[in-house]
Amino acid sequence: MSNGAAGPLSGLRVVEFGQIAAGPFAGSLLADLGADVVKVEKPAGGDDLRQWPPVSIGADGDGYSENFASINRNKRSITLDLKDAGQVEQARRLCIAADAVLENYRPGVLERLGLGYAALCAESPRLVYCSVNGFGHTGPYASKGAFDATVQGMSGLMSVTGEPDGPPLKCGVPVGDFGAGLYAAFCITAALLQARATGRGARIDCSMLGGLLGIAALQTSEYFGTGKAPRRLGSAHPRSAPYQGFQASDAPFMVAAGNDKLWQGVCDAVGMPQLKNDPRFASNALRAQNQAALAAALAPAFKRRSKAEWLAELDRRGVPCAPINTYAEILGDPHVVATGLVREMTLPNGRSTRTVAFPMKISGYEFSVYRNPPALGEHNGEVFEEWLSPTRATRGKG
């Protein structure tokens, strides 16, 4: 196992005060691209995600959380008791030696410890300081606690998720946490470019609510343009049809015929050319307006053949379609295997597992798990020696 990665962010030093998902996910993106991310954890138990199942048991009987491993690979772990003034001072020195600080505590926690942006920036003007939280540091909800599910509800996302006649549903993936983590990693990288060019870092206030509104651009623009709130459509699309799930004889599958040519391909595939001339379905806009009638016309035909048969038929005609996979199915899919999206990884207890690689390709850089996910406090000695040696002591000052 290598001690570092020659990735595009190699040489950057990041201190992560991260708990559970949003902050640690942002840190994992930076670490996957080569940044030296040092995760600061409390001595008793560390990040609470370490206790989340599933827990894989090693040969000696010690367990390690697979959830924690998935977003903390390629990092180093140190433990500091932030209730101890001497250890807070150690944390401060590490932050001054860093290029960036990433944290997802409640607003005000690190400021009270002297580890907020204002205090650290006074000593290290080049420092990039990113806070990830539910609602940001300003506004009436700034001090309100947040979890992914509650922010999904507040953001409007749940109002457009689910069947039209059913209750609002939470997305099965914690998009509030992970969307904010993506924004955080992007903003940190942009601010580091600014710091390199100007000598001045930045304070980044990254909220989960803002992230969910940001990625809902199509839904918010629909409201701005019509004055009407978007509604739940199940697997269907508000502006295209047929663009939804259908039931084959054995299993459901997705069809996405987003233009007139693809629609004609669907008509030919199901053997219903007369639908091409139906005035209700003459354009994409009309098909979307009449998609309940359209689905009712197509559904009986799709039930006559198996999912595999329909996928082959629609693929042959160039109509976008896909199975509705479980994670067990997609992680073993030939395309996922061929593109190297699943990699081997070893936990600190010696147990072998797998992880999803950094999913995007960058020429000249090949992702690797160059550091296995860390044991709690595994790097206490080496980080302080490397980061706070005399040759590093003045890093970031300007």
Image: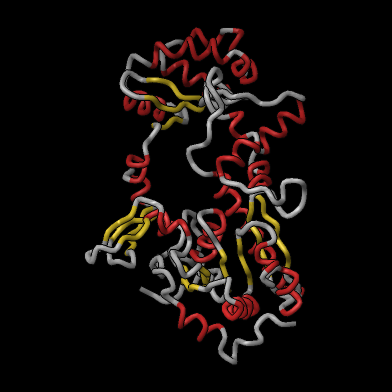
Q: What is the image's colouring?
A: secondary structure
362 relative to 120 in the view: left or right: left
| Residue positioned 54% across, 24% down in the render | 167
Asked whether the viewer can see residue 54, the reply is: yes
| Residue positioned 27% across, 62% down in the render | 351
Which is more toward the observer, 281 or 345? 345
106 relative to 330 in the view: left or right: right
Quadrant in which the N terminus appears: bottom left
Give the total number of marks visible in the rendering.
0
194 relative to 295 in the view: left or right: right
x, y percent for residue 384: 52, 83
Which is more toward the observer, 19 or 268? 19
x, y percent for residue 86: 59, 81
Looking at the image, which residue sits at the far bottom?
Answer: 390
Relative to 260, residue 70 above or below: below
Relative to 295, residue 160 above or below: below
| Residue positioned 65% across, 78% down in the render | 96
Quadrant in which the C terminus appears: bottom right
Dividing the picture into quadrants, the one containing residue 184 is bottom right
x, y percent for residue 328: 33, 41
Asked whether the viewer can see residue 340, the reply is: no
Relative to 316, residue 64 above or below: below
x, y percent for residue 228: 73, 23
| Residue positioned 31% across, 45% down in the render | 332
Which is more toward the observer, 334 or 194? 194
